[in-house]
Image: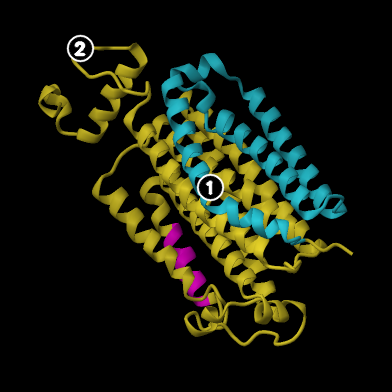
Chain colours: A cyan, B yellow
Amino acid sequence: MHETATHDTKGQYFWVWAALLVLTAIEVVLGYRQMFSPVRMLEVLLLLSVIKSALIIGYFMHLKFETALMRWLLVLSVVTCFVIMYFFFFPDAERIRQLGVQ
Amino acid sequence: MVDDFPADRKGNWGMAEATIEHDAVQHGASGEYEAPLFGAYSKKVGMWLFLASDSLTFGALLFAFSYNRIYTNPWPTPFHAESIANATIMTACLLSSSLTMVLAVFAAQRGDRPWMRNWLLATMVFGTAFIVLHAMEWSKLIGEGLILSGFQTILGVSKTATSGELADISKNIPQFPQAFFGLTAMHMLHVTIGVIYLGVIAFRKWFLPALAVIWIAGAFMIPSGNVFHYPVHALGIGLLVAAVIVLLKPKDYDAHDVEVCGLYWHFVDLVWMFIFPLVYLMSTKVS
């Protein structure tokens, strides 16, 4: 807890909040304009969501300022589980996508 | 470890544990007390482990939603400009609530209890606004015909529109309402638990009467045909759990408790950052 005072200031949280709102606005504009195909749109929106979640986890949840052991253990364990889920999901999803689902 | 406590600290085990562990973390003390594994106090590590497991729950639901999305052709696009505007305001509410939560943690760390309460209250207001907006949107969609059969048989929801775009979706593509209501209900439940958690941390036992009033008012004011007529009693369960916690183990919540509560709240915000684009923006039709 005492690390908080040395690593972060209130100002940076306002910047992170503003960045999250801007990224959300970009997502909404992309949704309104529908300028990409659904699959490409999904990729772009997921990329933006990952950036937003990294900002929330790193700054708001303060993981950026925790010990390296805690950071790596938490991130790697959760990402590993998602990768395993992805391998269950991916082959059939890719097969369906190849069939031309819009 | 209990036997090592000075006699004057044994009477209040919870506080003694928190204080001594915190001292060990702050000063790198070793020897008498075991150094924490992750350089953090145990409550924080416990909350992180819970959130890691909860992220897998939401991950599984989001994967299921995405799979439905891919194999269903054509996928319905029931969210028009009004729904997207509503969901965007809801997103702004959650993002702003995360900022006020951070400010509450700052206030707690500098020992400013009045501002800690003010910021926690602001966070609760944003969270409640999110729940109300979401509930209104649910009611509107259900009224227009987007419904699960379970809503009518289990929750006693009044008959909704039987024709129109949304009613057709419910009949022809039931996997859409299944995925939509399943995912958003799970998230709404988490937000509700979060608001109660914030209330307990901010106001302790004084929050219980307020929660009881909201619960009873909701039970009487929500009409019997509404989808939330029975689920509002989740507030009663929340009241019971909160009462057990604050009455059986009274405690003056400190900056650590506020920070741990904040971790939960930010997680709820984080999950919405995936639900909003996947569920709403990928099912948009703006004409």
SS for callout 1: helix
* Residue at left offset 61%, top offset 38%: A53
* Residue at left offset 34%, top offset 12%: B27
Measured along the vertical axis of the image, is residue B233 above or below residue A23?
below
Between disc 2 and disc 1, the foreground one is: 1
Residue B100 placed where, x, y %?
A: 59, 38
Report the residue that reaches farthest toward the right: B287
Q: Is residue B239 magenta?
A: no
Does residue B144 appear anywhere in the picture? Answer: no
Amino acid at pointer 2: Gly
Answer yes or no: are tags 2 and 1 on the same subunit: no
SS for callout 2: loop
The chain carrying label 1 is A
Residue B85 placed where, x, y %?
A: 78, 57
Q: Which residues are magenta?
A: B210-220
Amino acid at pointer 1: Phe
Measured along the vertical axis of the image, is residue B261 above or below residue B103?
below
Mark 2–mark 1 distance (CA, rounded to whole Å): 46 Å
The chain carrying label 2 is B
Q: Provide the major secondary structure of the magenta segment.
A: helix
* Residue at left offset 56%, top offset 54%: B63
* Quadrant of the drawing holding the N terminus of chain B: top left
